[in-house]
């Protein structure tokens, strides 16, 4: 009897945990909207903090493992965490549709400087050129391959998982970057964009730079730019959306045909260098 009743009881518990997750998410959204848009002046620079950032911070604070007791333990259950990560893309679909709506009114202006949008895709190689040597110097070894292939978003996650598996060192590397970007990316870029604007960067260039392949990071960066320069809101949104679309599509080809071969060559060169040093030290 007990074994027969166990599966329905487990299913009922999981349904309740899911309901708690949805209610908790709505509560965080409500509190974040109540806090609203805030500005923090730091010297001559004003950092804009959006409701999205408050929501990320609240989700992080309540998700601290030491605090996951009682109802929070059920909300942050492994099943709920797995579900949230797996179906995050469904939440992003309306945002993707919004991208298209933002791009259309400024399509002529975007096409007039289209080559710049294509050129910025080469910036995706920065994680390899700058990040890989640092990661290897820190001793990450094979994990450096996953953690420096890109920003660790869906494209890199899919490539590494298919080629190496997420249980490998490469998989752990890309998962680490994915989680760091999810937790801190929106917060960082919401603060970094207005800082660069204060240093004199063109708002259109910063809007284009906002589209780095992450919907949450792009939204945070472009929204703070809109709040800082509201008279160029349409241009900022359209440039950021166009850049995001290009990064999502062309970024995959940049990764496969440019970043991966470059990373492999740099990693092999590093391995040969360290091997020679090791042989020289033993003589």
Image (cartoon, grey):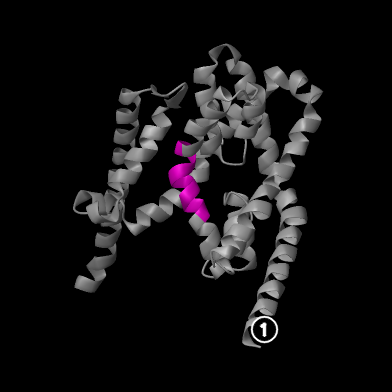
| The C terminus: image quadrant | bottom right
Span colored in magenta: 177-187
When asked about the image quadrant of residue 105, the answer is top right
Residue named by callout 1: 279
Residue 159 vs residue 174, the one in the foreground: 174
Q: Position of residue 12 (x, y in %)?
A: 27, 55
Q: Is residue 184 magenta?
A: yes
Residue 258 vs residue 44, the one in the foreground: 44
Q: In this view, does 74 lie to the left or right of 278?
A: left
When asked about the image quadrant of residue 161, the answer is bottom right
Residue at left offset 63%, top offset 82%: 281
Q: Does the magenta stretch include residue 252?
A: no
Which residue lies most toward the top here?
Answer: 231
Residue 233 vs residue 103, the one in the foreground: 233
Helix, strand, or loop for circle 1? helix
Q: Is residue 41 left or right of residue 113?
A: left
> Looking at the picture, does residue 275 appear above or below residue 182?
below
Q: Can see residue 181?
A: yes
Q: Where is residue 15 in the image (x, y as percent from the top left)?
A: 30, 51
When asked about the image quadrant of residue 94, the answer is top right
Residue at left offset 31%, top offset 25%: 35
Q: Position of residue 174 (x, y in %)?
A: 55, 58
- Name the dominant secondary structure of the magenta segment: helix
> How many marks can you see?
1
Residue at left offset 57%, top offset 58%: 147
Q: Can see residue 87?
A: no
Q: Is residue 23 left or right of residue 244?
A: left
| The N terminus: image quadrant | bottom left
> Looking at the picture, does residue 82 appear above or below residue 91?
below
Residue 174 vs residue 133, the one in the foreground: 133
């Amino acid at each position: 009897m007990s074994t027969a009743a166990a599966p329905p009881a487990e299913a009922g518990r999981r349904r309740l945990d899911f309901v708690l997750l949805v209610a908790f998410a709505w509560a965080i959204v409500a509190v974040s909207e109540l806090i609203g848009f805030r500005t923090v002046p730091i010297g001559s620079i004003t950092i804009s903090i959006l409701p999205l950032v408050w929501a990320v911070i609240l989700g992080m604070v309540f998700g601290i493992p030491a605090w996951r007791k009682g109802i929070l333990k059920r909300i942050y259950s492994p099943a709920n965490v797995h579900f949230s990560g797996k179906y995050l893309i469904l939440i992003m679909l309306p945002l993707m549709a919004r991208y298209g709506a933002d791009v259309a009114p400024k399509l002529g202006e975007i096409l007039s400087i289209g080559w710049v949008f294509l050129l910025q895709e080469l910036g995706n190689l920065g994680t390899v050129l700058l990040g890989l040597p640092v990661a290897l110097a820190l001793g990450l070894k094979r994990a450096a391959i996953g953690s420096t292939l890109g920003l660790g978003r869906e494209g890199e996650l899919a490539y590494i998982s298919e080629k190496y598996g997420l249980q490998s060192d490469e998989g752990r590397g890309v998962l680490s970057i994915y989680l760091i970007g999810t937790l801190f990316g929106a917060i960082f870029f919401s603060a970094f964009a207005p800082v660069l604007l204060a240093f004199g960067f063109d708002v259109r260039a910063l809007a284009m730079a906002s589209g780095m392949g992450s919907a949450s990071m792009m939204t945070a960066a472009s929204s703070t730019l809109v709040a800082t320069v509201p008279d160029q809101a349409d241009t900022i949104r359209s440039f950021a959306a166009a850049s995001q679309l290009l990064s999502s599509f062309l970024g995959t080809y940049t990764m496969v045909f440019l970043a991966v071969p470059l990373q492999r060559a740099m990693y092999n060169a590093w391995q040969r260098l360290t091997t020679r040093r090791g042989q020289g030290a033993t003589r």
